[in-house]
Image (spheres, helix red, strand yellow):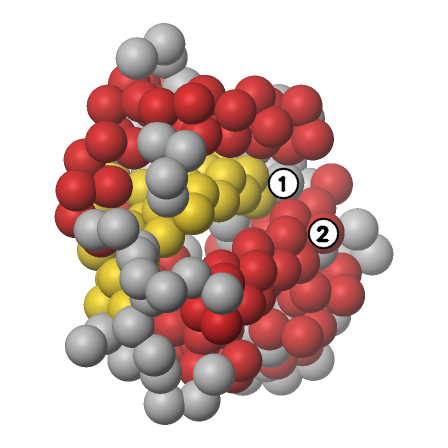
């Protein structure tokens, strides 16, 4: 029986890319573990409003059942992840304290994680073979634009095409070292998998 995870995301590209990233993390920790990921999209401006996060968490909880986990992955944009993240997590846990819930705000943008591991994307999808990560990838406002500027002439960045492709390629360990928000996602997945040994309702 596969392990169920629900992913609440904000962008069209995230619907495809986030499950790829989570599946890669899971397989790196517990190779061969069967997982089923249920992504669904809620615009960030709507999700953070009073009542909407709670409604989305309820939907996710019904999709994954008693043993599943709920991951909410959003761009922080100009908000401080260390402030907004705990606020959203408190709201989510209040409505469903019986579920494992993770709130991860990619500092600035999801694509900041690609910038953190830019060397692992060299030569792929129109990126140069000498691509270097910026010194502080999570400080860049406009990670999509940064990537687009690195492409060969007449090549544009597409969230729905390039984001899932880069999600399959970027170096997870390098991203952990250079992007604290990605390290949080990785650590939260580890924490949930650790619960497999203590939660009798989780299938082994």
The residue drawn where x is 50% and y is 39% is 103
The residue drawn where x is 53% and y is 80% is 29
Question: Relative to 12, is 116 on the left or the right?
Answer: right
In this view of the protein, can residue 152 be seen by the observer? no
C-alpha distance separating marks 2 and 1:
8 Å
Relative to 33, say whether 88 is above or below: above
Question: Relative to 184, is 65 on the left or the right?
Answer: left
Question: Relative to 55, is 71 on the left or the right?
Answer: right
Circle 1 residue: 107
Circle 2 residue: 180
Which of the marked residues, 2 or 1, is nearer the chain's N terminus?
A: 1
- Where the C terminus falls, by quadrant? bottom left
Q: Secondary structure at mark 2?
A: helix
* Residue 71 position in % (x across, y down): 40, 47
View extreme (front): residue: 200
Q: Nearer the viewer, residue 97 or 189?
A: 97
Q: How many marks?
A: 2
View extreme (right): residue: 135
Q: Secondary structure at mark 1?
A: loop
């Amino acid at each position: 029986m596969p392990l169920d995870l629900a992913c609440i995301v904000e962008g069209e590209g995230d619907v495809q890319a986030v499950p790829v990233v989570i599946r890669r993390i899971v397989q790196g920790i517990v190779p061969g573990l069967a997982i089923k990921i249920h992504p669904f999209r809620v615009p960030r401006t709507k999700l953070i409003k009073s009542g909407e996060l709670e409604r989305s968490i309820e939907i996710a909880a019904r999709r994954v059942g008693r043993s599943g986990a709920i991951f909410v992955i959003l761009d922080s944009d100009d908000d401080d992840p260390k402030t907004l993240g705990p606020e959203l997590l408190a709201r989510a846990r209040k409505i469903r304290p019986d579920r494992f819930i993770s709130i991860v705000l990619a500092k600035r943008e999801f694509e900041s994680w690609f910038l953190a591991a830019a060397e692992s994307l060299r030569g792929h999808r129109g990126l140069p073979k000498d691509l270097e990560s910026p010194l502080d990838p999570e400080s860049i406002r406009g990670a999509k634009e940064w990537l687009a500027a690195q492409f060969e002439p007449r090549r544009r960045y597409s969230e729905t095409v390039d984001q899932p492709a880069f999600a399959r390629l970027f170096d997870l360990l390098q991203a952990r070292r250079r992007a604290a928000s990605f390290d949080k996602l990785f650590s939260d997945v580890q924490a949930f998998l650790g619960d497999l040994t203590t939660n009798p309702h989780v299938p082994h």
